[in-house]
Image (cartoon, rainbow, N blue to C red):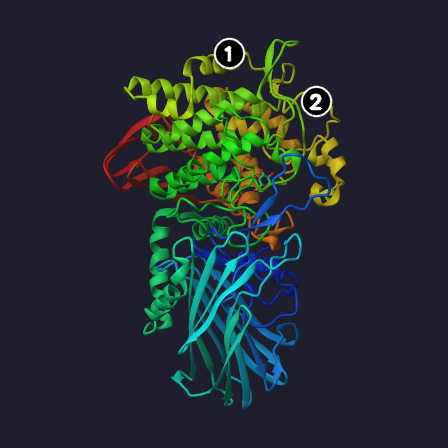
């Protein structure tokens, strides 16, 4: 174990993130970092007991949202009426207690010892502390997890032990839907009571979301033990609006321990019928009544073990990097499991409210490769199907801004396919997102070799997206070229620009790819009739325009510098480098006025470079190099999505130190709170970028012409690294050290791979 430097309060450990000694000032950060989840629900690592210091309670249920009425200063036609928000849902883990009649408040206690940790190997949130409060000294020990062995289950153990004198303890705990979102637009509460009920010792509580009418139901069973034995005690049932629970009183002798063991089921109407959801929740708990805490914990740990067997990255010689990569992989696995095509990967997952809806272009551009590489291809396919199922809404979105001929514009942010972003420069202009959705289809087919997805859903989505580009691009008679005006590229520090190079490029790429897909399907004898009829698609006339656009599109560039221009006139801005800025200005978005940000040349995140990363084979190494050397020094990386793209490109260009700097920045973004916003929640989607920095960056992994290739490099700070990769029904273990690159086929049939351009047949172990 080794201590870290900045905001220096978390211990570096290969499998754990540990807070040794309580840091109340950073409590919200720790709550985000130690969040737990199982794909169906999750929570911030808030303390069980009352704490009057900084805290942001947060419990979230996947796919359950509330359309909060839009709040903007100046309404623009076309704005969505609602902003779909991830809901802060039922609190199941708070434990309020009194010591000799005085309510315990951690902020008012003397904290003599403190240890809080999230164990990423096992998915267990654990804490132990020694406190003195109201003249009594005692330990608190707590453990909790959202089971991934049964994703309907949350389990908690909480103990007060070694009390320094005989005391009376009164504990109140239950299930509480009387909660609020911090970011509610009108300070409204989003839950309505459905049913609050006791059935013997099992208590249950269910609620409706207002407007969307989702129901969520929970049931709980609690047991108390004193010194390991069941005891009789006084208990009062409490039932109030949206709350159910118990107050239990105990006399505890000096030196003794009181333990609470609680099982909670949490289910939603996404999977259960409103009419009997409470009974279903009760039955889940009922089924576990004879299970002990350790038994449930063992099942959960075993399920995590399986996940790690397919997804781990091991780094030798650099504990900060090791902790960070596991931290990223851990949270991605807690957020999305790929079992349900209605769910997606929100930028904050189950760790915070910010960013509202669950789906951004982040999913396609960043997350898809992670799930492709670490899970079965079914998981990534669910992500594609999610968009396919929302295609009708994408047509509506395009119609909203005037395109009514079957153009599809996917939303910037969404829960159910409807746009819920309401800043005109993003909602209407950050349309490059459409390109990423098409790119994900390409990525999936290229990685898995499964082209069957194109025969129907894939092609349907591609035609809708291509039609959008064909309508949105205009022909300039003056320049005799096609152009795209009034857009925002990935760099959100420039709005309403003309001819953003990346957007123009990806738009034309979509047209090209759709035409290629049509040709490849035609070659296979695919019958287009029913799809074309459904879409009213006139291939001949529509593809004529597409081809004309492809041949005559305008791409801004500067011949002298040999770079693509981020947009028209970018070079006319005052050209400064980030290195010339006094650090006190960073992050710019927290220190500069918005107009200053917009006028400056500083770039929030990869923009031209995002295009080079996606379409690397269409550009020379020299073009990569010139653009990287020009743009990176102007980039402030204030989007979490930025450093990983730079890490991958820097690795490709052999800029080892830059690649490593960018790797640490993406990997430790939340652990080190680089952007000063970890307290709002973690940057879940960019975590996939961290994984890519290792696998696509340092290991140089690509899939080209059906072959898996590696171009490995080893960061100086590392002795070796190895990772597991799922590729076309095989599991491969890749180890890179200064002795070379070893690839072992752990599961599946023999396969050919390339390492540094040489071809190898792999049946057991290869050393290059
Ligand atoms: C980035 C977007 C991203 C969003 C959600 C913003 O800060 O600029 O590219 O989609 O965050 O992660």
**Residue holding disc 1:** 548
Which disc, if any, is residue 571?
2
Q: Is mark 2 within 8 Å of ligand 1?
A: no
Give the quarter the ligand 1 occupies.
top right
Q: Percent from the top left, x then y, of residue 253?
A: 50, 90
Q: Is mark 1 within 8 Å of ligand 1?
A: no
Give the quarter of the image for residue 580. top right
Q: Secondary structure at mark 2?
A: helix
Nearer-N-terminus badge (2/1): 1
Q: Percent from the top left, x then y, of residue 449?
A: 32, 30
Instruction: Say above or below: 665 vs 616.
Output: below
Which residue occupies 43% across, 72% down? 262
Between the C-alphas of marks 2 and 1, the distance is 29 Å
Q: Secondary structure at mark 1?
A: helix
Residue 153 visible from this viewpoint: no
Nearer to the camera, 85 or 744: 85
Which residue occupies 59% across, 27% down? 402
The image quadrant where one finds the C terminus is top left
Whether the residues at callouts 2 and 1 have beta carbons within 8 Å, the answer is: no
Give the quarter of the image for residue 23. bottom right
Q: Residues within 10 Å of mark 2 (few under 14, many from 20)?
A: few
In the drawing, does residue 582 fall left or right of residue 634?
right
């Amino acid at each position: 174990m080794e201590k870290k430097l900045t905001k220096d309060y978390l211990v570096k450990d290969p499998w754990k993130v540990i807070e040794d000694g309580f840091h109340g000032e950073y409590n919200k950060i720790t709550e985000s970092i130690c969040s737990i989840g199982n794909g169906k629900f999750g929570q911030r690592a808030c303390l069980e007991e009352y704490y009057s210091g900084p805290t942001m309670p947060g419990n979230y249920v996947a796919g359950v949202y509330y359309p909060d009425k839009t709040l903007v200063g100046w309404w623009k036609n076309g704005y969505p009426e609602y902003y779909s928000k991830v809901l802060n849902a039922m609190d199941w883990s708070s434990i309020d207690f009194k010591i000799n009649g005085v309510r315990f408040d951690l902020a008012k206690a003397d904290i003599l010892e403190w240890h809080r940790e999230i164990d990423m190997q096992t998915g267990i949130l654990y804490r132990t502390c020694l406190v003195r409060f109201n003249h009594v000294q005692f330990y608190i020990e707590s453990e909790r997890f959202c089971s991934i062995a049964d994703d309907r289950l949350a389990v908690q153990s909480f103990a007060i032990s070694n009390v320094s004198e005989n005391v009376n303890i009164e504990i109140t705990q239950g299930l509480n839907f009387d909660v609020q979102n911090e970011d509610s637009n009108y300070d409204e509460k989003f839950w309505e009571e459905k049913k609050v009920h006791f059935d013997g010792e099992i208590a249950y509580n269910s609620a409706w979301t207002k407007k969307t009418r989702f129901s969520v139901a929970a049931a709980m069973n609690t047991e108390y033990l004193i010194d390991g034995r069941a005891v009789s005690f006084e208990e009062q049932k409490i039932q109030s609006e949206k709350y159910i629970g118990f107050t239990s009183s105990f006399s505890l002798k000096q030196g003794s321990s009181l333990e609470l063991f609680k099982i909670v089921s949490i289910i939603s109407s996404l999977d259960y019928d409103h009419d009997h959801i409470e009974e279903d929740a009760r039955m889940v708990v009922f089924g576990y009544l004879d299970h002990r805490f350790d038994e449930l914990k063992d099942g959960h740990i075993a399920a995590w073990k399986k996940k790690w067997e397919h997804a781990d990255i091991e780094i030798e010689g650099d504990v900060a990097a090791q902790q960070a990569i596991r931290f990223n992989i851990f949270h991605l696995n807690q957020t999305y499991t790929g079992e349900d095509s209605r769910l997606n990967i929100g930028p904050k997952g189950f760790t915070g409210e910010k960013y509202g809806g669950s789906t951004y272009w982040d999913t396609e551009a960043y997350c898809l490769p992670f799930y492709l590489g670490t899970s079965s291809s079914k998981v990534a396919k669910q992500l594609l199907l999610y968009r396919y199922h929302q295609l009708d809404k994408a047509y509506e979105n395009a119609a909203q801004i005037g395109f009514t001929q079957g153009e599809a514009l996917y939303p910037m942010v969404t829960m159910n396919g409807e746009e819920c972003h309401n800043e005109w420069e993003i909602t209407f202009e950050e349309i490059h997102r459409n390109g990423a959705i098409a790119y994900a289809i390409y990525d999936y087919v290229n990685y898995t070799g499964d082209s069957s997805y194109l025969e129907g859903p894939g092609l349907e989505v591609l035609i809708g997206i291509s039609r959008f580009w064909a309508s949105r691009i205009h022909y300039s008679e003056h320049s005799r070229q096609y152009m795209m005006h009034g857009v925002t590229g990935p760099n959100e520090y420039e709005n309403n620009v003309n001819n953003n190079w990346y957007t123009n490029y990806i738009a034309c790429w979509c047209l090209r790819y759709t035409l290629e897909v049509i040709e490849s399907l035609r070659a296979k004898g695919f019958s287009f009739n029913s799809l074309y009829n459904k879409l009213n698609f006139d291939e001949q006339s529509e593809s004529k325009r597409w081809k004309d656009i492809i041949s005559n599109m305008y791409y801004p560039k500067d011949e002298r510098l040999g770079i693509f221009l981020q947009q028209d006139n970018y070079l006319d801005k005052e050209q400064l480098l980030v290195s010339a800025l006094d650090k006190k200005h960073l992050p710019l978005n927290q220190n500069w006025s918005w107009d200053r940000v917009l006028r400056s040349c500083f770039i929030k995140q990869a923009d031209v470079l995002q295009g080079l990363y996606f379409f690397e084979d269409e550009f020379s190494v020299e073009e990569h190099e010139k653009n990287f050397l020009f743009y990176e020094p102007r980039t402030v990386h204030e989007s979490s999505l930025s450093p990983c793209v730079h890490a991958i490109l820097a690795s490709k260009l052999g800029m080892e130190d830059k690649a490593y700097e960018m790797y640490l920045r993406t990997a430790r973004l939340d652990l080190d709170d680089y952007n000063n916003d970890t307290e709002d929640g973690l940057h879940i989607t960019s975590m996939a970028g961290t994984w890519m920095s290792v696998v696509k960056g340092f290991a140089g992994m690509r899939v080209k012409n059906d072959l898996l290739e590696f171009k490995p490099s080893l960061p100086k700070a590392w002795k070796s690294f190895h990772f597991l990769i799922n590729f076309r029904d095989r599991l491969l273990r890749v180890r890179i050290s200064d002795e070379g690159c070893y690839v072992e086929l752990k599961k599946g049939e023999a396969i050919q791979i390339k390492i540094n351009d040489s071809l190898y047949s792999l049946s057991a172990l290869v050393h290059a």
